[in-house]
Amino acid sequence: MVKRLSFSKEHEWFVKNSGELSKKYPGKYLAIIGETIAVIGATASEAFKLAKEKNPDKKVSIAYIPTAEETVTFL
């Protein structure tokens, strides 16, 4: 029996929109709630704290968007 990996709704939305997000928010941390960017921060803790202050009862996921310099391409 093969076990299927299960990802959160936030993760799936992030992956689906990663191209657009990487152009708009390089070097930033995104606090994601559902399929929405709740907060954009300079640090993960800042983004999480602000998102929880605005949405205390919601699950907050944090994603970092690397800059072009931080991205390594393997050929």
Image (cartoon, rainbow, N blue to C red):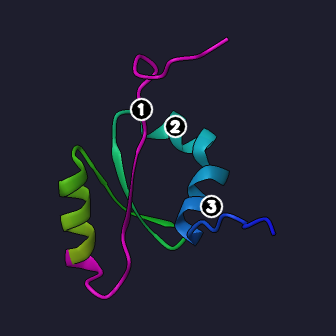
Residue 15 rendering spot, x and y as whole percentages: 61, 51
> Front-most of 73 and 55?
73
Name the amino acid, label 2.
Ser
Point 41% across, 26% down: residue: 67
Measured in 3D between alpha carbons, the distance from the residue under mark 2 to the one under mark 1, in whole angstroms, is 7 Å
Place residue 4 in its image quadrant: bottom right
Mark 2 and mark 1 lie on one chain; the one further toward the N terminus is 2
Q: Is residue 57 magenta?
A: yes
Point 79% across, 65% down: residue: 2
> Front-most of 27 and 71?
71
In the image, farthest residue toward the front: 1
**Could you classify mark 3 by the number of other residues whose Cα lies within 10 Å: few (under 14), some (14-19), or many (20 or more)?**
some
Residue 22: image tag: 2
Query: Considering only vertical position in the picture, is 64 above or below 23?
Result: below
Of badges 3 and 2, the one in the foreground is 3
Q: Secondary structure at mark 2?
A: helix
- For label 1, the residue is 66
Of badges 2 and 1, the one in the foreground is 1
Q: Secondary structure at mark 3?
A: helix
- For label 3, the residue is 12
Residue 14 rendering spot, x and y as whole percentages: 56, 55
Task: Please provide the residue range marked out in magenta.
Answer: 53-75
Name the amino acid, label 3.
Glu
Query: Considering only vertical position in the picture, is 52 above or below 71?
Result: below
In the image, farthest residue toward the right: 1
In the image, farthest residue toward the top: 75
**Could you classify mark 2 by the number of other residues whose Cα lies within 10 Å: few (under 14), some (14-19), or many (20 or more)?**
some
